[in-house]
Image (cartoon, helix red, strand yellow):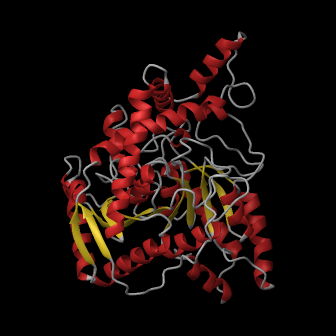
Amino acid sequence: MKTFHTLSEIQSEISSGKLTVLQLVKYHLKQIENSNGRLNVFLSVNEEAAISKAESLDQKIAQGKAGKLAGLIVGIKDVFAYQDHRLQCASNILEGFESQFTATCIQRLIDEDAIIIGHQNCDEFAMGSSNENSAFGVTKNPLDETRVPGGSSGGSAAAVAADMCQVSIGSDTGGSVRQPAAFCGVIGLKPTYSRISRYGLASYASSFDTVGIISKSVNDAAIVLEVMAGKDEYDSTVSQKEVPSYLPKNSNQKFRIAYLSETLEHKGLSQESKETTWRFIEDLRTAGHEVEEAHFSLLDYILPTYYVLTAAEASSNLSRYDGVRYGQRSNDFELEEMYKSSRSEGFGEEVKRRIITGTFVLSASYYDAYYTKAQKVRRLIKDETEKLLENYDFLVSPTAPTTAFKLGEMKDDPMQMYLEDLYTVQANVTGIPAISIPYGKDNSGMPVGVQIMSKSFNEAKLLDISNQIITFKDQND
């Protein structure tokens, strides 16, 4: 079976009688069977349920009653609740746990007849940039199995790149959708914070966590966003704004765009990523957009601000995993020792590192020195970013400082690993939407991603410019 680039192509073939949903599901299941043993992408596969749903969906299509996502095969990161299916957040602390309900965003996909094919591997509790922190082993990049797929939604990006599913739903707390999308050569969209309900998403850092989309095309990201977005009675933090149409208009609207000079001058940026970003900037100019240099004075403060605040929130959020009510439990019989041992045995090294860091910055002696100060700096970063976006429609930068690195290359150097989030965390600290699109390859043939950011709730124009520039690149390559 051929590889489909968009859902519209799939639905066109189904309408013409050339394809059935059942054939499509069996194809993706075969892809998973052939590759999952090597790549370690899916932690669970809903084979029987997917086949059953496909058979009933083919009947609905014949009757003209199918939803707008009929024919879309979706994988979900192992941080989303899906009723009666295992949910472990790639952690031993949730050993054997099955969800009692379905996340709002996942339910909305199901309601429009998308088929959920399985849960995908990730860094434990979404903490990591390489997918090497999972309790269930590393995921490999399908484009080069000696390299990481990025993280924390590495399994989700790898699944789309390897055609194991058409779209993946991930979470983006500091770049966890965009960075792996860049590493795997696919599209990664982080919407505005609060655009999609977080109900049913296992919390890492609640004021940063955002449901994101990994896809092969901008159009697929747009239609999936349209379905998932909107108010939800189960999430008091979700936006009440109406959901517009996000499908790109194929317009030739010209925009005012800024590139952040500090991102291109940073010592951590690889030469190949730098050259690709400059080529992207020149292509924007050639396509008729007004592109100017802009400065962001707080770039070096974004990453420490992010890690102080997210560690603090993680320390609070993960305190609920105690081994008492569900999941892994130590054999110690003394209550206090049981708590300590359950958490020590159940959590991996990176999760424990962040919990300890977060507990430290929240302690009475250091609360003002770290947590309060970081909140103040977050406001400064947000204000400076929004001031830039008053003058420009978009801000562009590299998605990541490097392309996909070798497995194990940074495993023992947490600080170097944290630098992989250098360019993506700005959108999470400020809550604005951002997208990574593939825009070339390095000398090893690995994809390079470029990032576009915009003002809050400006996803429609963000998707429009992304579609424009991808089309321009395809026509001129």
Where is residue 115, by image quadrant? bottom right
Residue farthest top in this picture? 334
In the rendering, at what x and y percent does residue 327 appear? 70, 31
On-image quarter of the C terminus: bottom left
Q: Is residue 19 left or right of residue 411?
A: right
Where is residue 374, by image quadrant? top left
Where is residue 194, by image quadrant? bottom right
Rendered view: 451 above or below 18: above
Q: Identify which residue, 283 or 442, lies in the foreground.
A: 283
Rendered view: 460 above or below 263: below
Rendered view: 325 above or below 79: above
Residue 203 visible: yes
Q: Is residue 306 left or right of residue 289?
A: right
In the rendering, at what x and y percent does residue 165 appear? 58, 64
Q: Is residue 287 left or right of residue 421?
A: left
Rendered view: 310 above or below 392: above
Residue farthest bottom in this picture? 16
Residue 2 visible: no
In the rendering, at what x and y percent does residue 73 appear? 63, 67
- Residue at 68% of width from left, 27% of height from top? 328
Q: Identify which residue, 355 or 180, lies in the foreground.
A: 355
On-image quarter of the N terminus: bottom right
Report how many numbered discs are placed on residues in the image. 0
- Residue at 35% of width from left, 42% of height from top? 303
In the rendering, at what x and y percent does residue 320 appear? 66, 31
